[in-house]
Image (cartoon, grey):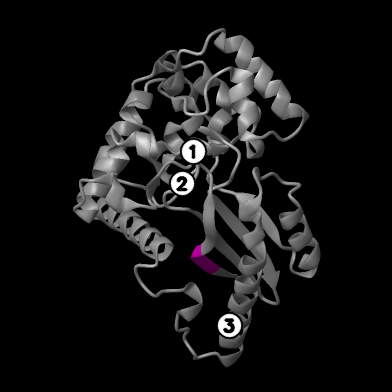
Amino acid sequence: MKKDAGFIEFNAVLLLFFIVALASGAVLYTVSAIIYSQTDNHDFDNKQAADALLDEIIFKMQPLRLFSYDDENNEVITSLCREYESYALEFTDVSSGYHLDFLSDANMADSRITRYLFTDNTGIAFSAWRNINGLSVSKTAWREFVREEVWEACVSYGWLHKDDIESFAFRSISKAFAVIDPENLFPLINDFPRMNVNMVNPEIIRPLIMRSAFRIERANERADALINKLKSGSILRSDISSILRIPSNHSLMGYLGTKTAFWKIHFVMPSLKIEAIVAAIPKEGGAVQEIELYRLIDRSFLDD
């Protein structure tokens, strides 16, 4: 068991290393540069073609960074899906929600949050498991700890927010990289909001708004107002603060944003399915949600 736990932790830290290295340009590495086994020339050619197509799609999605909000109807995304319709191209937000590894100590101590997320209502069982197994490479490992009703609200991709320094995630990352100052872990740690409210079931934001620590006046009433607004269409980040009647620098605004941090791209080629993870790299020193570029951080081939 200890051996398995260590392996999971190693893989998680390795993934974080490549996210940081790729995002910051610290190493010259691209997924398309991977050397394939050439035992099957046809397979090799197919994968090369898939990588070329993936590079093309990511290049064409770059204008998305200029939009003030992302949603399923964004013209960049919809036009790309039309252009590559023969490949069944799909974009999925995989970072908007509750990243259990990244929950702060304050969140894990908040009964409203833990009752919402965990089957034991406290998160104690999850914390005990996590302390043994470390960071996770996917949310599948959390299944037994999470309430079925909120499973879709959980994610395993995301940037660690600068306000979550008091967290299991930061302690693990700091130890793995032997770095104490979070400023030296950009872009892994930044101020990008934790979820895009336009890409989630609006009801999942209620526990955050209701947290007593945020001191939102008439919290339930204002949660209703924001949720109803989202049900009628997409909103801007300024709409969030206006509806909740809080300043744009309020700590709750570190949770609720309108841009997606990590996208999954999926498309199909003959005898091959491709899934890739693309990260929105924040602009260092830029405004909240200001994106420098979108960069490929992971890719896998799934044979039909």
The residue indicated by pointer 2 is: 158
Q: Quadrant of residue 85?
A: bottom right
Q: Is residue 24 left or right of residue 198?
A: left
Residues under labels 1 and 3: Cα distance? 34 Å
**Of tags 1 and 3, which is closer to the observer?**
1
Residue 97, numbered circle: none
The residue indicated by pointer 1 is: 194
Q: Position of residue 185 (x, y in %)?
A: 31, 52
The residue indicated by pointer 3 is: 48
Out of 213 and 288, give the one closest to the viewer.
288
The residue at 63%/81% (across/down) is 49
In magenta segment, residue 283: no
Q: Quadrant of the C terminus?
A: bottom right
What residue range appears in magenta?
296-300
Label 1 vs 3, first from the N-terminus: 3
Give the class, few, some or many, for how many residues have Cα within 10 Å of label 2's Cα (few <14, many ≥20): many
Q: Position of residue 10 (x, y in %)?
A: 28, 57
Q: Secondary structure at mark 1?
A: loop
Give the class, few, some or many, for how many residues have Cα within 10 Å of label 1's Cα (few <14, many ≥20): many
The answer to whether residue 107 is visible is: yes
Residues under labels 2 and 3: Cα distance? 28 Å
Q: Residue furthest top?
A: 218
